[in-house]
Image: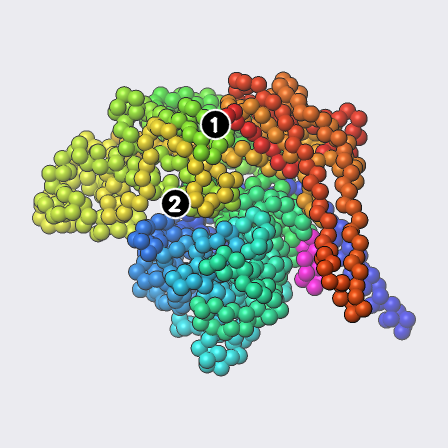
Amino acid sequence: MKQIKKALPCIFAALTAISSFEVMAQKAPDENRFTKVVLGEKLDEPMEMTLLKDGRVLFVERKGALKQYSPETGEIKTLATIPVNTKYTNAKGVKREAEEGLMGLIHDPNFEQNHWIYMYYADPDVNQHVLARWELRGEELVASSKKIILNVPTQREECCHTGGGMVFDKVGNLYLTVGNNTSNSGTPGYANLDERKGWEYWDDQRGAGNTNSLTGKILRIKPEADATYSIPKGNLYETLPNNGDGLVKKEIYTMGHRNPWRPTIDSKTGYLYWGEVGPDASVDSEQGPRGYDEFNQARKASNFGWPYFIGDNKAYADWDFETGKPRPNSTYDPAKPVNDSPNNTGLKNLPPAQKAFIWYPYGISEEFPLVGSSGRSATGGPVFHKADFPTGKRVFPDYYEGKWLIVEFMRGWIMSVTMDENGDYKSMERFMPNTDFGSAIDMDFAPDGDLYVLEYGSAWFRGNDNAKLVKVEYNGGNRMPKVVAKADNLTGSAPLKVNLSSAGTNDPDGDKLTYLWEVKSKAGKKVFKTENATVLLDKAGIYDVTLSVKDGKGEENSESLEIKVGNEPPAVAFNIKKGNKTFYFPNKPIDYDVTVSDKEDGSLTNGKIKPDQVAVSIDYMPIGYDKIEASQNHRGVDAVAFASMGERLMAKSDCKSCHIVDVKSVGPSLKDVANKYKGDSKAVEYLSKKIINGGGGVWGDHVMAAHPQISTAEANIMVDYILNINEPKTAKSMPTQGSYSTKIPDGQKSNGTYILRAAYKDKGTKVMKSLATEDVVVLKNPTLNPELADKSKGTQLVITPGRSFSMVGDKSYLGYTNVDLTGINEIEVTAQAQTRVGAAGGVIELHLDSPTGALIGTSDKIEPREMRMGPPPAQPAASTTGVPAAGTPATTPPARPNMNSKLKISVPQNAGQHDVYLVFRNDKAKDTQIVMAVSAIEFKASE
């Protein structure tokens, strides 16, 4: 019996080990067992969501809207609008869009009993961000229930970084991410360490590195029932008496953050996880390391190093912005960081810096190559534990137990990150690798186990058609059909013929499918039971088109489109009349002409559309440029041009007889109207109806006449003009035709991009709102990075011990799409073939349209070369004291020889615009043999 008892633990241990091995050995579920379901589209800058037990999804939008998705109705509705600030105003009085507004949302852990929600927003009047609590009774946000929990002082002169992510732990502590609120513009993508007087907003030592500031932190507080809060044990400075003699904020859980984003708590370990957006530098320099984004883990209160360290504690230089050089002894020590900035109001000696959990640059990451390369913006995501969803119907499989699902805003992927038994990083793999989750700004599991993703959309500071609320459902049994619905026309004048296609629709289980197209409008519904359909939409209006597909086992899925009939969208073209359409050449002019035509409005050519109604801009964007900065400028140019149309419509109407811009007349001044309705999200709809229908009683006894001849679209344009009449016009549109010299702006490097853009917003029609169209031409620097080719075959990237990009095997190639060869007489490729890597050498062929297309040029042959470093010089004779003899030259290591060759390919005249392929040839090269390494490709213009 003793032997049996002794054996039982061994048996149980063996069974446990086998079970653990089985989980580890599990294969990732097929991607088609997961379905991405779109719940709502065309959102207006969604920011953060919170998921309720009754299935509702609450989310906030930057401009102040609190919205709800109801699973019962399948609809999204606005529950309330919170007044918020959405503008920065710099020291010169120039206004521009801000990252701030309504930034964060979470429901209380006891929401079913107390109905509390918390929102984090930019105060509309005071320079501060506010954490407040409200009651949400059903679908009513009770205004009188608002309680201020916490204020975070901020500056509103310079952009950026706000944070706003929130999460509760299991004991009711609330974590809040707070951005550094520090300008990026003072340094080319490195640490913000500007200590000059007057440049305080460019010094993050006053924020993220300051123990006496709430910015650049993750805060942890315990909200109490009376709307106060207590400080949890274990916060970074919780034990210091008297707030460290006034030098610390006890709310700080972690510090040293630039832009911490969406946080999550591992329900099993209690560890905190989040994504963090890093700076923009693309190369290491004397000022410090290139930029890295991070996904981080905190097991306890800690310092994560910014602005002194990035990634795995790569240190920045203590940079002197007066001299543009590093200060003596400028290397920061991650074990003992010191904040000696004159802008620091906290402790001088900081806690040791913790290295990032995952870190990656714009380029290929040596440590985490799977994350890829390109733009970057680390969001965050949840840690999965099946026990968190005891009643879920579609809970993710055991394979994901304990894994952290992280999403990347720019790159559009979700990674499944595996940790070992100690919580350390072990590995990562793509989750749903063939599905794009671009612009994901929040991601979390709902109480029922479905994964929800909130997607901001592709353009900054405005609503986007691709701004969506989606959920990912897991199906362990019969799988739902994948549905693709397409239409060859989405807008146009009546009658509009539309071809509907289901191409791409399939069933992962191979079941036979049935198809149902429904085309709905106010006039009625048309139904087609075919895979594809053709429909003639002969009346103006908005048509909702839905393709529903059902398999033989009852699973159904659908996809919808919206088709607008009654207003042909404008045709806008930014035409380059003289110059290259792919590349710019510094200081060389380009002649351009913008054309605009609209079926209803006329055209620039016939004079019915005026040049000042067209937004035209040409911007130089340095490499790694901030897309937010570009969007801010475009919005300013658009506002000026589109306001011109509103002003013209006002002038054509009788409005001017009763309303003057800045003086009260029969009716109020336009500026008074703008002030009265500032920040009112319903003002455009309300005032448009008033213009059309007339009315009175708001400004006195005088009744405004009705204007039934004005369409809703025209009224919208007029109201937009009025409501923005007080905004300073800081951006100026360029002429619709002219010549522009592509001069590199002072202080900028010449490897950036020119963005040429034209946009026009039409007047709309009586039955259809205005439509805007833009045309964008991107002119690249003529020197291309071979690693970023549009198409490639046979490439190999090695990043240790040095970076090397090689072409492997005969007929390997690099392809670039739609390249204009006008004015290009030569392509120069910087390459090398080293014998120490067994390079074969060879020639480069230039082909058009495909790797086997027309051959129009060939380079000279590059022969393999041996890199000879040579022996070091002989050591100098030493004196008897062991010191080198007087007059003996100091020894220096030999310089590394330049192994690069410039391979030139002549380009014939009038080659035109084509896909261009550089094909690397050596018919004696083995399939896995390097032909040559390539470091640059330059398209050279004729003089």
Query: Which numbered tag is attached to residue 201?
Result: none
Q: How is the image coloured?
A: rainbow
Mark 1 crowdedness (10 Å alpha carbons): few <14, some 14-19, many ≥20 = many
| Along the viewing direction, whichever of 826 and 223 lies nearer the viewer | 826
Give, as a single range, the part of the protein colored magenta: 418-427
Rendered position, 798 above or below 575 = below
Q: Residue at x 47, y 27 (%)?
A: 581
**What x and y, as percent, mark residue 794?**
71, 33
Rendered position, 812 above or below 157 = above
Query: Which numbered tag is attached to residue 632?
Result: 2
Q: What residue does disc 1 label?
A: 581
* Disc 1/disc 2 C-alpha distance (Å): 25 Å
Disc 2 element: helix
Magenta stretch contains residue 422: yes
| Along the viewing direction, whichever of 378 and 266 lies nearer the viewer | 378
Q: Tell me if I can see residue 707 in this picture.
A: yes
Q: Residue at x 19, y 39 (%)?
A: 691
Mark 2 crowdedness (10 Å alpha carbons): few <14, some 14-19, many ≥20 = some
Magenta stretch contains residue 18: no
Asked if residue 14 lies left or right of residue 517, the reply is right
> As shown in the figure, which amino acid type bears the numbered disc 2?
Gln
State the image quarter where residue 759 is shown.
Answer: top left
Question: Looking at the image, which residue sits at the far front?
Answer: 887
Q: Residue at x 52, y 76 (%)?
A: 238
